[in-house]
Image (cartoon, coloured by chain):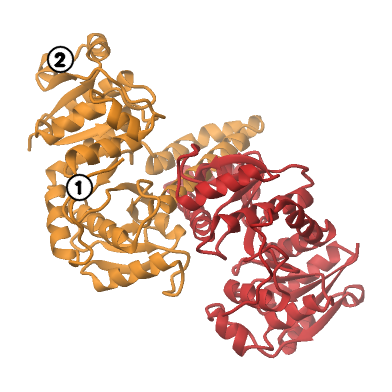
Chain colours: A red, B orange
């Protein structure tokens, strides 16, 4: 299936020097994709001149010039109001006008969400889009949402996230009845705050395959296919785990560098360490989906390198090819009880 | 300084077979401590008969019989109301009557908190006690609170936690002006929910050494000496990190067991792995403090082994010897603005 991806070349910590080569390797690996490179055309052209892609690749590539760039620390409202010709805005417009099937950006998350929401609008039944990502787990992997788009959520929002996550996983992972866990501080029903308790009630009443409450350690155990939480908690959980991974990596390096003997052992252990690294490589899992929009929008990590950005592009194409968006729309319609459905809102920022 | 510790021998996954030997090794390592073993005296006596401590140790040991045991999954309210002769209740009474200077239990956290709060009451200015623990970090270690006692917190509660944590660290770690970080989903002031924003404001106005917002990864980086958050978020952050540690450990074991060659490398790398393990060994960091009570109460992990339980006992003694409780009381009095101070409440459960 032919898929066109709009790529924000300017986003992320590196911009075109990373995004453009990633796009070229992506094009050469999948003959049925085309890409619209969005951003300052001169900078993009410089990269293309250097990399000299084969004419066959160039045929599936075009540049859409955008004169403005949203800074990584810019306020979303200022990007939305003041930068109508930013690479994010131009790319989202391509998605809206169906000139692209998906959009990937490593740029400012808040601006990406605000602009996408303003231009594309949310799916029927959805108040607020959530950020969903896939993480490594003991028995495969796990999808977690929300990861930071919504700092205050009602039980109804969390139910909406659960429906979207479930529909997403059933398509992307081809699982008929994925299990949904509700992130809490204990398994028992009496645990947690009022929002979580009410959400558990809504989930039990729903048609979803609700497993029950799960705890922080269940995320990486892979106890359920999907873990639902508000954006504050999800963000802290993910970043705490990242922090611990850094701690372990740093200390391991220090221990292997302690003396000549440990250095030799370190060299011998390198293949094992690399095998481990591949299995939990965050680059492999790069590409968080902005779920709940009328369009496939993915956020790459700002610090993504060429390989990681390429992974996000592949994920975007997969979401288009599996018909994820249509399936989410159907599920929201069938699974959300009428009192939880909300009218599509205009974004006020 | 002579210190007497009341020990709940019945708590935790193992009870007397772990708690009693841990107490004996604790007594033999510190000649200035005495212990009151609290629980079913027959079961405690069986352990003592088996272990046969030297007469010099026995002199610093006595048993306080408690006819009831709080189950690990029992509702706190039922333990508080229905088990007036539980090992937790008897031990807390010893603390209240000044027959002990500190109390350590590996039992049911909710029951431990409810009973301690009911019997001991909270310190002046404190609405709700918090659970504080120390974790390994890149540059030493970090104190985090709350870890699960309070699922819904106001900004005033979080300020109270910050004052208590700061006072604790300044004594236990002998740091004059420990830095306080507020756990959030971004460093910028505009990030986070309303409670966090208001807390940041209160912290900036306070006499504390407020660093600003920190993110999940800052915990294990050790960006600040103390990280303050509500109990829901703290619990999820800690357990997510535990989950990731388990994932890494499991995958590393799998990779080292892949074939004969990797197994040999695994044997060679064992000393390095053990050195790493020692540095982040959760047993070393066992013993979370119930901060805000009129008494030194520590919660050991339920699954603590002899070594880990011994670490919790040592921590309890350290908190008594450094005069932590008196210092917290002083700091609450001096540092909490009048509008945040609340009258000591009776616990209603």
B340 and B325: which is toward the camera? B340
Q: Which one is nearer the viewer's eye here, A197 or B242? A: A197
Q: Secondary structure at mark 2?
A: loop
Q: Earlier in the sequence, mark 1 or mark 2?
A: 2
Chain hosting mark 2 = B
Q: Name the spot of residue A78 as percent of width and height, x first.
A: 56, 85
Horizontal and vertical percent position of residue B219: 40, 56
In the picture, measured across the screen, residue B31 lies left or right of residue A51, that is left
Tell me the mark number nearer the camera, choosing from 1 and 2.
1
In the image, residue A270 sits, relative to residue B219, either above or below, namely above
The N terminus of chain A lies in quadrant: bottom right
Residue B178 at x, y percent in the picture: 24, 61
Residue A264 seen from this side: no
Q: What distance separates the C-alpha of mark 1 from that of mark 2? A: 39 Å
Q: Is residue B43 visible?
A: yes
Crowding at label 1, few (<14), some or many (≥20) Cα neighbours within 10 Å?
many
The x and y percentages for residue B325 are: 15, 48
**Residue with the mark numbered 2:** B54
Tell me, yes or no, whether dots 1 and 2 are on the same chain.
yes
């Amino acid at each position: 299936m032919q898929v066109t991806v709009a790529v924000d070349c300017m986003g992320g910590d590196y911009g075109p020097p990373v995004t453009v080569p990633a796009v070229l390797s992506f094009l050469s690996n999948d003959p049925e994709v085309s890409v619209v490179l969005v951003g300052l055309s001169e900078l993009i052209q410089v990269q293309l001149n250097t990399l000299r892609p084969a004419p066959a690749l160039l045929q599936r590539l075009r540049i859409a010039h955008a004169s403005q760039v949203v800074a990584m620390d810019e306020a979303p409202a200022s990007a939305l109001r003041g930068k109508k010709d930013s690479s994010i805005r131009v790319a989202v417009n391509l998605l809206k006008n169906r000139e692209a099937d998906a959009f990937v950006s490593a740029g400012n998350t808040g601006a990406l969400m605000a602009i996408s929401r303003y231009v594309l609008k949310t799916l029927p039944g959805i108040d607020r889009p959530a950020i969903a990502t896939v993480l490594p787990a003991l028995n495969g992997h796990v999808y977690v949402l929300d990861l930071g788009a919504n700092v205050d959520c009602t039980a109804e929002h969390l139910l909406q996230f659960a429906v979207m996550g479930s529909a997403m996983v059933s398509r992307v992972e081809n699982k008929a009845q994925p299990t949904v866990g509700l992130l809490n501080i204990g398994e028992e029903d009496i645990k947690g705050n009022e929002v979580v308790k009410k959400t558990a009630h809504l989930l039990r009443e729903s048609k979803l395959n609700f497993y029950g409450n799960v705890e922080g350690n269940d995320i990486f155990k892979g106890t359920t296919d999907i873990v639902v939480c508000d954006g504050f908690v999800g963000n802290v959980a993910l970043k705490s785990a990242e922090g611990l991974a850094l701690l372990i990596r740093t200390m391991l390096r220090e221990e292997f560098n302690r003396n000549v003997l440990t250095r030799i052992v370190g060299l011998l252990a390198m293949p094992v360490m690399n095998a481990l690294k591949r299995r939990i490589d965050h680059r492999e899992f790069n590409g968080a989906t902005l779920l709940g929009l009328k369009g496939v929008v993915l956020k790459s990590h700002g610090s993504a390198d060429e390989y990681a950005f390429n992974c996000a592009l592949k994920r975007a194409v997969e979401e288009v090819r599996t018909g994820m968006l249509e399936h989410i729309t159907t599920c929201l319609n069938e699974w959300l009880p009428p009192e939880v459905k909300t009218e599509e809102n205009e974004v006020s920022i």
